[in-house]
Structure formats: structure tokens, C-alpha cells
Image (cartoon, grey):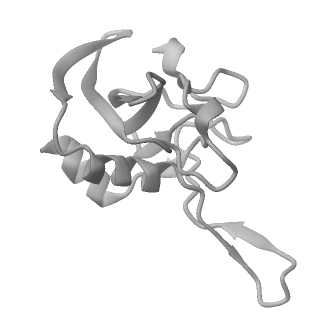
Amino acid sequence: MAEIDNRPDLEFPEDGMAGNRGRTDGFLPSPLAVITACRYRADGDDLRLRARRVLRDDLEPVRGLLNTAAAIQSVTDSQGGITDFVNGADCGMPHPTRAAVPVSRLDVVGAADTTGAVAEMRIWRAPCQAVFSGTAAGLKAEPALLRRLDS
């Protein structure tokens, strides 16, 4: 469990697509060749693989869901001075008044694009819901992505 603890001092998930990504590209900039989704559950101090699915067809809608999940959404005030990130989540992060809570349910999505690059996204399901990717940490998990993972 400690290996996927996403506190800021630890590593982000694998992001081999960073080199292909331009300034305005989404998390997954190129068409995908395959997606692997794995579901893990806590078993004592370990996370155990409970389900695994590989997708090779109809990947564009899933790519869209993953790009949306990894995008930082922000709003700037009317004077253009203050920007608020509206989809941030402090899920599992250390806080001055509480300890970080270890993840007990986790989905991991690995995506390989047509260039051969691979990127990973971790979606915490419990104790809270948040998305961790190579571009951002601790974003709110969108219901559409969670429904797709459950299906």
C-alpha cells in the first residue's frame, strides 16, 4: 500500500507519454492501441488484484474519459487575478490536523498509445475518490469515469 501512497513527496504514476504531450494536449495525446484496467482491494497490509480487463476496441470514448479525468479545471475571477482549481481533492493527502489515509480500494488504468508510449492513471475508490495521473494528483473522480470502470 505504501508504494501507491500519493503524497506529494512520492512519485507520480508512470507517464511515458509526457514526451509526446504538447502544452495544450490532454493526458493521452495520441490514439490508443490498448487499455488495461485493474481493480485492487485491501487485504491486510497489501492490495490484491481482484479483477483485470484488457480493451483493444472502441478506445476513443475511454480515452476521452481519461483525458477529462486528468485535466485540471480552473476558474479565474472577473478581475483576472485569482485562479481557483475547481476539481482538486485532498483525498488521502497529509493535512496538519489529520494523518494521510491509506487507499483500500483502487483502480489502475494503463494505456498504451500507437507510438508505443505507456501512461498510468490511479483512481482511488476508498476511503475517498480521486484521480492521480502523470499530469495531476488528487483530482475529483468524475462519475462518468467511475461508472465506466464499474462496467
Number of marks drawn: 0
Question: Nearest the camera: 59 or 109?
Answer: 59
Q: For the view shown, which residue lies furthest in the left direction?
A: 151
Give percent across and percent down for residue 130: 45, 45
Q: In this view, does 122 lie above or below 138?
A: above
Residue that appears at 23% across and 15% down: 49
- Location of residue 108 (image quadrant): top left
Residue at 42% from the left image edge and 28% from the top image edge: 103
Q: Is residue 79 above or below residue 47?
A: below
What percent of the width, then of the height, locates residue 28?
Answer: 47, 42
Q: Quadrant of residue 50?
A: top left
Residue shown at 27% from the left, 53% from the top: 61
Q: In this view, does 133 lie to the left or right of 113?
A: right
Q: Is any atom of residue 126 visible in this view? A: no
Quarter residue 36 falls in: top left
Quadrant in which the N terminus is drawn: top left
Q: Where residue 37 appears, x then y in whole percent? A: 26, 29
> Does residue 107 appear in the picture of this structure?
yes
- Compared across the picture, whether 69 is left or right of 20 comes to left
**Residue at position x 38%, y 42% in the image:** 31
Quadrant where the C terminus sits is: top left
Seen from the viewer's position, the closer of residues 66 and 79 is 66
Is 49 displayed left or right of 21 in the figure?
left
